Each structure stands twice: as C-alpha cells, then as structure tokens.
Image (cartoon, helix red, strand yellow):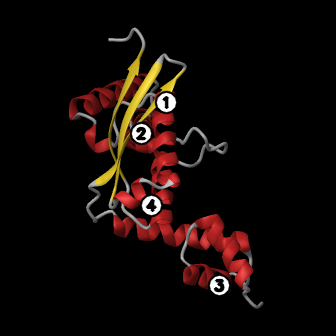
C-alpha cells in the first residue's frame, strides 16, 4: 500500500513522533494506523529507557487542589525549559498531581521505601501465609506477589493510572509515554500531599 502524506500527518498528530518514524511505522504495518501507533509506542518506550540516563534538570513544580480539602505540590523534571512549557508536559504534571491526590502514594518509587517498612510488611505477610497453612516452598513466590501489590499501593510510579479505564496502565508507563512523545528524559522528582485537618 502507498503511504500518503495525509496518513503520515494523521499518525504524527496522534503520536507526536517524527515524520520519518511515522512513515517507517506505516510502511511496516502496511498503512494500518492503529498498528502503526502500537509500533511507535513500543519503540518509544524502548527509546525512553535509553533516555533515562540523560540529566533532567529543567521542568516545573505544579499544584493540584481538590475540593479545597486536598492539595498536592509535585516536581516533574525534563531536559529543557522548552519542553517544560509545552501543553503536553503541563497536562502530565496536572495528571500526576491528580493521581497523588486520589491514590495517596507515600513514595515516588520503590527504592525510596525504607527497608524497615519492607521488612515489617514481609513479616506480616509471612505470618498470614503460615497461619493459612501455605506450603513452605510456595511462601517465597506468594510473598513476592504480595510485596509487588504493596509497592503498587504506596509507590506513585507503580500505581495503576486513575484515568486509564482498563486499569492496566501504570503511572510509570504514562511517564514513559510522555517521554517518548517529547523525546526527553522525564523524571518525577518528589511530591507533597496535604489534607485539610491532617497532621
């Protein structure tokens, strides 16, 4: 199938990818727009992994207030101030602030969870499993699954993204998607959540 300029334009508008990348993806998928989007998303996430090593020292501190009862300040970094001012980056920061307000994470990533807290959780889960009479050879595997679930509750990047109706996209995948669209390394640096009347 011949790839037209209109098809390339459509794909660029939907993904934000470069013209040559769009043309190549459409060529690989025989002009199928949806499949081409998948190809670009997969390669974009792979490129985002490589980008993660680059310094992200620009960005923005954004705020999100929900119902005058919950407030969030969040710092999201990127590589250039040009990207930090784009509508897509501003929207990402706003959505991340909304996620923190709604899902109440304690940490950005699992590496920040104190070792004592992880050990305490492990101890509780191990005791529960022993009380349920689970076989010893299964406990480690079950424990790993329970810990991953714990991280998905307390770590922002591992939480299911609240605006994804399927519940499959994580916040980390949302950030990687934004990174592939902008072509820059994007890092969620830190956040603070305030709730009216809470200590």
> Which residue occupies the foreground of this view, 84 or 52?
84
Q: Tell me whether circle 4 and circle 3 mark residues in contact (CB < 8 Å).
A: no
* Residue at 66% across, 74% down: 36
In the rendered image, residue 25, in percent from the top left (x then y), is placed at 62, 80
* Residue at 64% across, 67% down: 13
Is there any visible trace of residue 185 in the rendered image?
Answer: yes
In this view, the mark in front (2 or 4): 4
Q: Which image quadrant is residue 19 in?
A: bottom right
Q: Is residue 197 above or below residue 52?
A: above
In space, the residues marked 1 and 2 are separated at their CA atoms by: 8 Å
> Which residue occupies the foreground of this view, 7 or 144?
7
In space, the residues marked 2 and 4 are separated at their CA atoms by: 17 Å
Please give the residue where the numbered disc 4 appears in the rendered image.
Answer: 179
Indicate which disc, 3 or 1, sits on the residue closer to the N terminus.
3
* Residue at 56% across, 49% down: 169
In space, the residues marked 2 and 3 are separated at their CA atoms by: 35 Å
Please give the residue where the numbered disc 2 appears in the rendered image.
Answer: 156
Q: Tell me whether circle 2 and circle 3 mark residues in contact (CB < 8 Å).
A: no
In space, the residues marked 4 and 3 are separated at their CA atoms by: 23 Å
Is there any visible trace of residue 138 in the rendered image?
Answer: no
* Residue at 65% across, 84% down: 28
Please give the residue where the numbered disc 1 appears in the rendered image.
Answer: 103
Q: Tell me whether circle 1 and circle 2 mark residues in contact (CB < 8 Å).
A: yes
Indicate which disc, 4 or 3, sits on the residue closer to the N terminus.
3
Please give the residue where the numbered disc 3 appears in the rendered image.
Answer: 28
- Crowdedness of circle 2 by 10 Å Cα count: few (<14), some, many (20+)? many
Q: Which image quadrant is residue 165 in?
A: top right
Q: Is residue 60 above or below residue 83?
A: above
Indicate which disc, 4 or 1, sits on the residue closer to the N terminus.
1
In this view, the mark in front (4 or 3): 4
């Amino acid at each position: 199938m011949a790839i037209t300029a209109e098809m390339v334009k459509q794909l660029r508008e939907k993904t934000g990818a470069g013209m040559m990348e769009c043309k190549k993806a459409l060529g690989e998928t025989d002009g199928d727009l949806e499949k081409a989007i998948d190809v670009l998303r997969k390669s974009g996430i792979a490129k985002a992994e490589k980008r993660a090593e680059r310094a992200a020292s620009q960005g923005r501190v954004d705020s999100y207030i929900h119902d005058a009862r919950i407030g969030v300040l969040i710092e999201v970094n990127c590589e250039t101030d040009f990207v930090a001012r784009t509508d897509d980056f501003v929207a990402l920061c706003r959505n991340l602030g909304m996620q923190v307000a709604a899902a109440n994470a304690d940490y950005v990533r699992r590496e920040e969870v104190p070792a004592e807290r992880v050990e305490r959780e492990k101890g509780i889960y191990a005791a529960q499993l022993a009380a349920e009479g689970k076989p010893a050879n299964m406990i480690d595997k079950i424990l790993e699954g329970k810990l991953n679930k714990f991280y998905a509750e307390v770590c922002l990047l591992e939480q299911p993204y609240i605006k994804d109706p399927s519940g499959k996209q994580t916040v980390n995948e949302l950030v990687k998607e934004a990174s592939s669209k902008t072509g820059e390394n994007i890092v969620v640096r830190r956040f603070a959540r305030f709730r009216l009347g809470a200590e």
